[in-house]
Image (cartoon, rainbow, N blue to C red):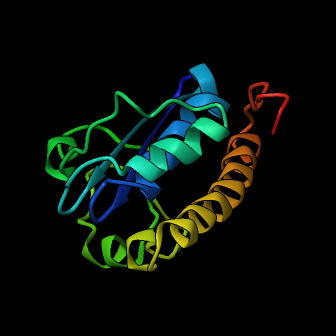
Amino acid sequence: MQPIRVLVLCTGNSARSQMAEGFFRQIGGEQVRVDSAGTAPSRVHPLAIQVMQEFGVDLAQHTSKHLNQFLGEPIDVVLTVCDAANAACPMFPGRAERLHWSYPDPGAVVGEAAQLELLREIGRDMQARVRAFITERGGVPQELDPNE
């Protein structure tokens, strides 16, 4: 089976899109080729790195990237994970399927404890959606951390 090419987009490419990229790599394994990018990239949020470690995913070496570097690549699925990126997302050439999973902006929440809880909620939902995505496309989700 040819890997599914997924591009996950968000505004800053700092939390939600990075988390999705990490889950696609963890759950999809060789069945998925994934990158994430932003319409206005910044940095990978330290709290997103922390929360993803709880899910057994290491984002420490990830960097924020601009979506323009992927415009010429063949993409099977363009997944937006924030409403602003969904509105700003350009059309991709070829047969790219567009999906939108709306998640609230953790940066808009006041306080580190509240941001951590929101990121954990997003992580639990996103992990389930990525599993379903892989299964719906005929793949087999990879074994996850037994502590989840």
Q: Position of residue 73 (x, y in %)?
A: 24, 37
Give the quarter of the image for residue 107. Answer: bottom left
Residue 109 horizontal side relative to residue 88, left or right: right
Q: Is residue 143 above or below residue 111?
A: above
Q: Is residue 74 above or below residue 26?
A: below
Give me the residue at 31% from left, 79% from top: 87
Give me the residue at 43% from left, 73% from top: 105
Residue 54 horizontal side relative to residue 105, left or right: right
- Where is the N terminus found, in terms of image quarters? top right
Q: Position of residue 127 (x, y in %)?
A: 68, 49
Give the quarter of the image for residue 123. Answer: bottom right
Q: Position of residue 113 (x, y in %)?
A: 56, 67
Residue 66 horizontal side relative to residue 144, left or right: left
The residue lying toward the viewer, choosing from 24 and 110, is 110
Q: Position of residue 54 (x, y in %)?
A: 65, 40
- Where is the C terminus found, in terms of image quarters? top right
| Number of numbered callouts drawn | 0
